[in-house]
Image (cartoon, rainbow, N blue to C red):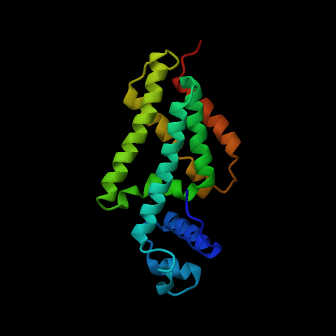
Amino acid sequence: MPLKVSPRKKKFLDESLKMIHEKGYKATTMRDLADRMGFEVSNIYNFIDSKEALLETYLFQISEDFHTGIDHIQESSYDPVEKMKALVSLNINLTSSKPYQVGLLVNEWRNLKDPKLTEFVDRRAEYEEKVRVIIKEGIEKKHFRPFDLDIITHAVLSSVRWVYYWYTDHAEEANPYELEKQLTEFILSGVCINE
């Protein structure tokens, strides 16, 4: 469970995530963050230890949110089609509530430094394997078409990873229910065997 933070610290962290999204992690400096908040660079260290610590904290936090969600899906009594629907729902829910953290997950993880980079890559691979297991079960139970497992796993993951864009860069406000409905229909129409 995340620690409670003061409104001032929350504002700082939110603005930091937005700036990293806008400029990119490498291009964002501590001075940029201080200027955005209207205070001295030295005051930044009241909120974070370093830019690297900010990246690590948020990346691993959102990664664990996804792992917790997919673990619940895997442990459920749902059939593979319902699990796929739940997977899309998980992505929409996390992305709509934490779009800039999901943006870090998609775009900025390569900026981690070892040993954190290796740890993150391992966790990412574990998540992909959990998605692969759901798809494999669907193929074996003849709910899903017998696609190449790697191709379909990456296609499904690619289909849900871009969603953060609707919450960060899109001028029109995203309706999470509509996004979930359309994305679920799109993915299921591609993977399910029509009966």
Against 132, is 24 above or below?
Answer: below
Q: Nearer the viewer, residue 39 or 154?
A: 39
Residue 189 in sight from this viewpoint? no
Q: Residue at x 51, y 87 (%)?
A: 40
Q: Is residue 175 above or below residue 45?
A: above
Displayed quadrant of residue 112: bottom left
| Residue occupying image coordinates x 60% and y 44% | 92
Camera-side residue of 35 and 8:
8
Judged from this view, the residue extending furthest toward the top is: 195
* Vertical arrangement, residue 181 with respect to residue 61, above or below: above
Query: Is residue 101 visible to us here?
Result: yes
Q: Residue at x 33, y 56 (%)?
A: 117
Q: What residue is at 50 percent from the left and 80 percent from the top? A: 46
Q: Nearer the viewer, residue 38 or 57?
A: 57
Q: Is residue 182 above or below residue 141?
A: below
Place of residue 89 in the rendered image (x, y in percent of width and height, measured from the top left): 61, 39
- Find residue 86 and report its horizontal and vertical position in percent: 59, 34
Which part of the image, by quadrant, shows the N terminus? bottom right
Q: Name the quadrant of the C terminus.
A: top right
* In the image: residue 152, left or right of residue 100: left
> Image quadrant of residue 171?
bottom right
